[in-house]
Amino acid sequence: MTADVKIQIEREIDIIAARQAGRQLAGKLGFSSTDQTLIATAISEVARNILIYAHHGEIVVGAIEDGPRTGIQVIANDEGPGIENVELALRDGYSTKNSLGLGLPGARRLMDDFALASEVGRGTRVTMKKWRR
Amino acid sequence: MPVPILKQGDTLIASIVAALSDDDLLTFRDDLAQKIGSVRARGVVIDVTALDVLDSFATRTLRGIAYTAKLRGAETVIVGIQPEVAYTLVQLGLTLDGVPTALDLEEGLALLAKRRAAR
Ligand SMILES: Nc1ncnc2c1ncn2[C@@H]1O[C@H](COP(=O)(O)OP(=O)(O)O)[C@@H](O)[C@H]1O
Ligand SMILES: [Mg+2]
């Protein structure tokens, strides 16, 4: 098994490092180059959300297995302000920063599994998975 | 890392060579708006061939750059969106909202020439 890779998100260049780490692991796990791009882009979205809304946090990428299936898991974790209405935040076009509001719903479409857990005042955790085809 | 802006006839050509920081993108936008005036450019080609990821933030910024250029009188074409990146943009639900695109630099220049002839 490959070890998890943890990237602290504090500055913009950390977003690039996180998506490169995701792409690299996905490549190692045998994901197609299209899937590598989908995974890297989903990481970019959640990492940017950490930076914008929580200012700092971390991204952890790791390999996962489920019987014969191999996949990649991405966890984005922060102790920022949290999200008041998680359902709303997952809606296309919803943004409290007047930006595109496609980060969370878009990342959900790019990955196979997507879970958003958030508590106001405590933080936000996004867990996403993609399985190798 | 600043984005170099080259002049070819009345067209400006800028190749984005790496993953750019927000500051780089904003500097590029301002440089471009400035240079359109100083060289009286009528067209801009932005080549994104080297970009392996275009997320919602970068796409929105590129759109903003193209609109800024247009307000300065220069039509912008974005060229070189990689196939995987194009597919990802569709999945994300992103559009370039009317900013014309072309396969590569050559096609982008041809598109600008055609549009100018039609004006
Ligand atoms: N890590 C986070 N911490 C707090 N709020 C967040 C976080 N991520 C997303 N949000 C909230 O969810 C909304 C939707 O996020 P997203 O879909 O990425 O769109 P955008 O970032 O363009 O607003 C954001 O506007 C913000 O209010
Ligand atoms: Mg976002």
Image (cartoon, coloured by chain):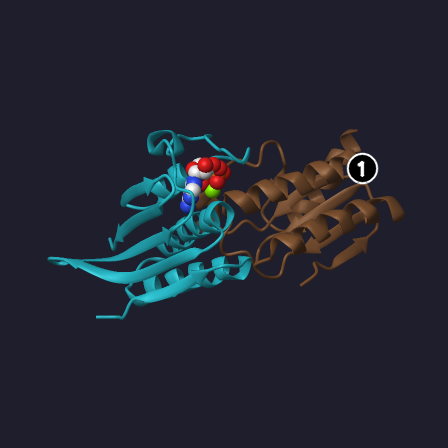
Q: Identify the colour of chain B in the image.
A: brown
Tell me residue A26's x, y (percent): 33, 61
Tell me residue B116's x, y (percent): 78, 35
- The image quadrant of residue B64 is top right
Secondary-structure class at tag 1: loop
Q: Mark 1: which amino acid?
A: Arg
Q: The cyan chain is which one?
A: A
Q: Please name whichever residue, A51 or B38, is drawn nearer the observer in this view of the structure.
A: A51
| Label 1 crowd (10 A; few <14 / some 14-19 / many >=20) | some
Query: Quick one: which residue is furthest to the left in this view?
Result: A67
User: Is residue A33 shown left or right of residue B17?
Assistant: left
User: Is residue A117 shown left or right of residue B30?
Assistant: left
User: Is residue B44 shown left or right of residue A25?
Assistant: right
Provide the residue designation for mark 1: B72
Which residue is drawn at the image coordinates 77% and 34% (left, top)? B71
Which residue is drawn at the image coordinates 70% and 54% (left, top)? B14
Quadrant for the N terminus of chain A in the image: bottom left
Query: Quick one: which residue is furthest to the front in this view?
Result: A121
Residue B39 seen from this side: no
Residue A74 seen from this side: yes
- The image quadrant of residue A58 is bottom left
Q: In which quarter of the image is ligand 1?
A: top left
